[in-house]
Image (tube, coloured by chain):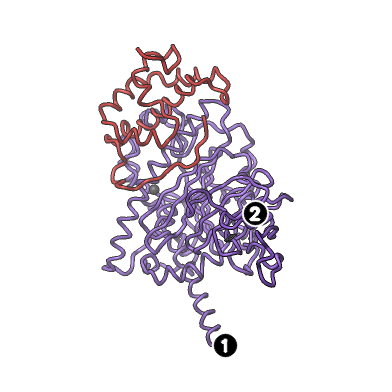
Chain colours: A red, B purple
């Protein structure tokens, strides 16, 4: 295995890290549109049971000063939020009938 | 049968008899001629919200705002005395755009001590005076005092920065906003400084998107698939009723129920709503500020269970206050009769933990899922309105605010046309 992106406690999620540890909403939305339902289902099934543990782990650090691997774990949680809509509501990657409509998130908070 | 009480007249619309109840023309949303009139009659005469004071944190902070509808750009700045001002973003020498970065038509922001034109280097102090002219002695009969920046009327209410492009606005900002809107003053907008700012170009007239967000009659239908299968169909069968509608001058308000996810059984919620403790109505857990003493203008009818107030501030600005202690704004910036730029901004008390931040993320992502459903539908509406196959459309009592918007815009345009005729006959 190459260099770990996530804290050791979450090493089982490493296979998803290079795809889904994305710092901006724009990247997460694009990754969702570029993914198959099967890929997102795999990520969702692995990550959803660990979400609470991941957030709790992040909150053992100062929120405004997260180490890089912890920030990446938090980004993975954001990505889980993003894929929850295709998985839980739409049964497809894009919003039904949304066509070419877009909304860009030009300002978003860190981390 | 209505499940919630209506005014004694029998309907919200009859409570405001000047609105009438007849079918409404949407010619005002497809006619390029009407749009040209709206530029002058509405957008060059109204107080327009261009942002918040938090975007100007220090003396010297500035941002630019493109106002395509008025064919101008303004630069809004906190000057060296701390006063917030606006100027037309044009250099007095040969008309170059004064403040921009890389892309002339894109907005920018920053901090500076003075403005310097990129073209020939003229300099202006932030209050607008011209202070430096390259090779000044080459000019003829020249006095720098004659070439300051062109000011734009600018005022601040509750931390919201407004401009008015009229030389002499007919009303002060406070009078323009009127009692219904200003009664919100004191809401802790200033503590809700974490910002998610979305923008998209929409293929419809600006008023169609305002209509789409000022009636919730569509919500249980258009958005049904966002709900778990356990409540989607029943909520569609139940439909939507506003708890309170109010009209004050050109402005309007709807109050609704909703939210309360923390009181719902799991089977009525999506797994991510439970996991994040958040959803469309925002984080379930309120932020750590005083939310028990709201100004009277918030939830003005004191309805329970209160979900949200949507204040539609004429012409193109919406402030939406949610029961859980956050707010969002909408801006609709027309670019043509059949296009506009939509901006949606969510504001939260800055999170103190990753858990709070995840709840904000869920609210923001949910907002976008809904807004994209809404916005793409508008293009479908616009394209068929333009067929002019149908000339008038029935609006129900839950669509009272749509009726009011189109009526007010029509009145402002008519008043402008009357003035033009009077001018011409002089
Ligand atoms: S146009 Fe600005 S200095 Fe010439
Ligand atoms: Fe909607």
Q: Earlier in the sequence, mark 1 or mark 2?
A: 2
Instruction: Specify whether residue B238 is in view.
Output: no
Q: Is residue B320 above or below residue B391?
A: above
Q: Mark on residue B426?
A: 1
Q: Is residue B15 left or right of residue A101?
A: right
For disc 2, does the CB lie below 8 Å from ligand 1? no
The residue lying at 54 percent from left, 48 percent from top is: B108
Q: Is disc 2 surrounded by few (<14), some (14 to 19) or many (20+) residues within 10 Å? A: some
The residue sitting at 51% across, 79% down in the picture is B418
Q: Is mark 1 within 8 Å of ligand 1?
A: no
Residue B15 seen in the current view: yes
Report whether B118 appears left or right of A18. right
Looking at the picture, how far across and down is residue B368, in whole percent? 41, 42
Q: Quadrant of residue A6?
A: top left
Q: Which mark is residue B42?
A: none
**Mark 1 closeness class: few <14, some 14–19, many ≥20 residues within 10 Å:** few
Residue sitting farthest toward the right = B81
- Classify the position of the N terminus of chain A by image quarter: top left
Q: Secondary structure at mark 2?
A: strand
Position of B283 relative to B384 (above/below): above
- Disc 1 secondary structure class: loop
| Residue B174 % position (x, y) | 65, 59
Across and down, in percent, residue B295 comes to 64, 47
The x and y percentages for residue B114 are 66, 51
Calculate the distance from the C-alpha at mark 1 to the C-alpha at mark 2. Answer: 37 Å
* Residue at horizontal 38 percent and vertical 41 percent from the top: B369
Q: Observer-nearest residue: A23 or B46?
A: A23
* Residue at far bottom of view: B425
The residue beneath circle 2 is: B156
């Amino acid at each position: 295995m190459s260099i770990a992106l996530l804290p050791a406690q979450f090493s089982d999620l490493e296979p998803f890290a290079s795809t889904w540890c994305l710092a901006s909403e724009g990247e997460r939305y694009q990754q969702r549109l570029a993914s198959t339902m099967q890929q997102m289902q795999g990520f969702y099934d692995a990550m959803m049971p660990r979400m609470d543990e991941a957030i709790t782990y992040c909150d053992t650090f100062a929120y405004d000063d997260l180490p890089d691997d912890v920030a990446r774990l938090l980004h993975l949680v954001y990505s889980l939020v993003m894929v929850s809509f295709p998985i839980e509501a739409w049964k497809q990657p894009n919003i039904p009938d949304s066509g070419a409509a877009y909304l860009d998130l030009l300002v978003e908070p860190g981390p | 049968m209505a499940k919630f009480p209506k005014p004694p007249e029998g309907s919200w619309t009859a409570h405001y008899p000047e609105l009438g109840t007849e079918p409404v023309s949407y010619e005002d949303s497809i006619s390029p001629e009407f749009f040209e009139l709206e530029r002058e009659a509405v957008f060059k005469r109204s107080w327009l919200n261009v942002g918040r004071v938090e975007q100007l944190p220090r003396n010297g902070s500035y941002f630019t705002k493109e106002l395509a509808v008025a064919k101008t750009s303004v630069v809004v700045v906190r000057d060296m005395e701390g006063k917030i001002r606006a100027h037309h973003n044009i250099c007095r020498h040969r008309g170059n755009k004064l403040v921009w970065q890389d892309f002339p038509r894109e907005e920018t922001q920053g901090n500076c001590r003075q403005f310097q034109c990129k073209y020939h280097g003229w300099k202006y102090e932030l209050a607008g005076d011209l202070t430096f002219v390259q090779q000044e002695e080459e000019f003829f009969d020249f006095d720098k005092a004659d070439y300051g920046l062109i000011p734009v009327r600018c005022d601040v209410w509750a931390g919201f920065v407004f401009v008015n492009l009229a030389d002499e606005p007919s009303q002060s900002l406070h009078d323009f906003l009127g009692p219904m809107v200003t009664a919100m003053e004191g809401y802790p907008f200033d503590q809700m400084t974490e910002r998610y700012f979305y923008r998209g170009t929409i293929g419809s007239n600006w008023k169609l998107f305002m209509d789409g967000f000022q009636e919730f009659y569509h919500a249980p239908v258009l958005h049904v698939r966002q709900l778990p299968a356990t409540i989607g169909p029943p909520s569609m069968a139940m439909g939507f009723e506003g708890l309170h509608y109010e009209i004050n001058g050109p402005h309007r308000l709807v109050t609704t129920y909703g939210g309360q996810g923390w009181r719902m059984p799991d089977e009525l919620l999506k797994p991510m709503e439970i996991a994040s403790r958040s959803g469309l109505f925002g984080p379930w857990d309120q932020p750590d500020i005083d939310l028990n003493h709201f100004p009277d203008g918030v939830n003005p009818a004191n309805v329970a269970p209160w979900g949200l107030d949507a204040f539609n501030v004429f012409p193109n600005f919406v402030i939406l206050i949610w029961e859980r202690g956050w707010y969002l704004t909408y801006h609709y910036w027309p670019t043509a009769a059949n296009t506009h730029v939509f901006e949606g901004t969510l504001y939260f008390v800055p999170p103190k933990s990753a858990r709070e931040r995840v709840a904000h993320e869920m609210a923001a992502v949910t907002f976008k899922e809904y807004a994209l459903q809404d916005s793409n539908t508008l293009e479908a509406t616009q394209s068929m309105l333009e067929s002019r196959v149908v000339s008038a459309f029935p609006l129900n009592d839950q669509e009272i605010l749509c009726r009011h918007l189109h009526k007010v815009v029509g009145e402002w345009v008519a008043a402008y046309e009357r003035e033009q005729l009077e001018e011409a006959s002089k």
